Image (tube, rainbow, N blue to C red):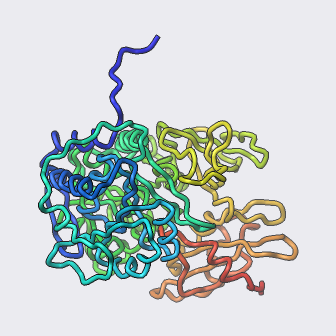
Amino acid sequence: MRGLMMDMPLTITSIMQHADQNHSQGEIVSVTADNPDHRYTYADAFRRVRQLANALAKKGLRPGDRIATLAWNDYRHFELYYAVSCAGQVCHTVNPRLFPEQIEYILNHAEDRWVFVDPMFVPLLEKLQDRLPAVEGFVVLTTGALMPETSLRNAWAYETFIEDQPQTFDWPTLDENDACSLCYTSGTTGHPKGVLYSHRSTVLHTLVSALPDVMGLSSASVIMPIVPMFHVNAWGTAYSAPMVGAKLVFPGPQMADGETLTRLINAERVGYSLGVPTVWLALVNYLDHTGKTVASLKTVVVGGAACPLSLMQAMERHGVWMNVGWGMTEMSPLGSLNYRAPAQYDWEQHRIDDMRVRAGRNVFGVDIKIVDDSGAALPRDGRSAGLLKVRGPWICSGYYRRDDDSSVDREGWFDTGDMATIAPDGCLTITDRVKDVIKSGGEWISSIDIENAAMAHPGVKEAAVIGMSHDKWTERPLLLVVPNTDVVVQEQDVLNFLKDKIARWWMPDACVFVDTLPHTATGKISKKDLRALFKDYQWP
């Protein structure tokens, strides 16, 4: 027997129309290249969204066509999110921090017909345009008056592109399983791989992400997504904020500038934000050096890379509680969130510290399990470490245009490439990436745990651990440290500091100071590049 409920499609259009009707006076504040203080309402935004949709239709764009963006977090990028997807096309957000060769591959692989680009990245596309045969035109995200001189073919200023278009648009009825957006992985090995999201997956992800024990969003929230809109849909905030009517604050190209972030937080009374650890390091350093405060900011989500306890404690000194989130591009990205449960307020400090660095419990809609090398499920005992697999309605079933893909097994489980443990209460701990885990004398060593312990030393600004070949033990950990210039510290000081904080046999055989550590385009430390840099390293 089937239920007697209406079969209404779950689409991004429904989020837009709900926000337009019920939260029309909600505010969006942006920093852009042409305006450091742009502000307007959701009603203003969606009126311009309709103009943009008309402009795209006038150019002959059809359902399923891919439209690329190389842009920062700002209101024009927000408009593209809705106009493109709700008109039936695919909003393809491209990470401008990737190597030019990767951007060329991504744009060609997706066969994007048009590219919308921030003025900062126009020179990049000018060099690539002759190798982008599918691209018919470019729209620079600025006004006609500030349109830069450019050799880009068929180039428009965004404001000119939409200015004469009607402010009404007949939105098509879409199938909820239609594609709405596309994001490529950073491609640390081989070519970047495309993750193609559907309207249904995006709406379900949006609903769960706003729940009280996840992000806890409401119309009273003021949210500043520092995580880029070009990376996994700004972790879904460009959809969840309008759905609940929250105020959005976009930092534009200044997302890693502590001074700009502090100004925006205080001026707009931001209470909730999201970003990778390097962003919060920049904010903490600015606050520590200037003595300024961010009184309104109460909670931030940190993800994208392991977050050391020392950074969490530094943020807490400024009145900000950090929640660890875990996920992947392939997961839209939300998989788990480590929120502070009421019972934890009475815990002893060491127990709180141990818990808060973990990835937390998987959210409703995401199933998780760990398996051994043979694929057999491992127990949820908090000790057994295995390969983490996931499945759910907003997790990819395969990569875009990749017939050789084997990331999803016959039972529908996606291989995350992470090693993890799961506690009896469901708490997930990511112990390492499979390709980064160190096997020494037949035993596994977690590079993440060593890095987190090292980061607690006041003389350590940034740390990374890689496994290096060893004649006796097969591999041993090498600790690489960017020292804090404000503190006098030697390599041996860091190793001595670790002696009572990690297992004895986990102790790195050496510590090497470096000026910088390589990062991927999404802000993670690139272990692949580190292994290449130190391939000829000889143990002392």
Residue 444 place in picture, x, y as percent: 75, 60
Q: Which quarter of the image is occupied by the C terminus?
A: bottom right
Q: Which of 34 and 425 is in front in this view?
A: 34
Q: Is residue 506 left or right of residue 342?
A: right
Q: In this view, does 534 lie to the left or right of 111?
A: right
Q: Which of 480 and 248 is in front in this view?
A: 248
* Residue closer to the observer: 144 or 460: 144
Relative to the observer, which residue lies in front, 272 or 483? 272
Q: Which residue lies furthest to the right in this view?
A: 472
At 30% from the left edge and 46% from the top edge, which residue is drawn?
86
426 versus 57 height, above or below: above
Q: Write the residue at 62% across / 79% down.
A: 480
The residue at the far top in this view is 1
Left or right of residue 299: residue 420: right
Can residue 257 be spotted in the picture?
A: yes
Would you say residue 342 is visible in this rendering?
Answer: no
Determine whether, in the image, residue 328 is placed left or right of residue 250: right
Q: Judge whether 130 appears above or below 207 on screen.
A: below
Q: How many marks do you count on the picture?
A: 0
Q: Residue at x 24, y 81 (%)?
A: 148
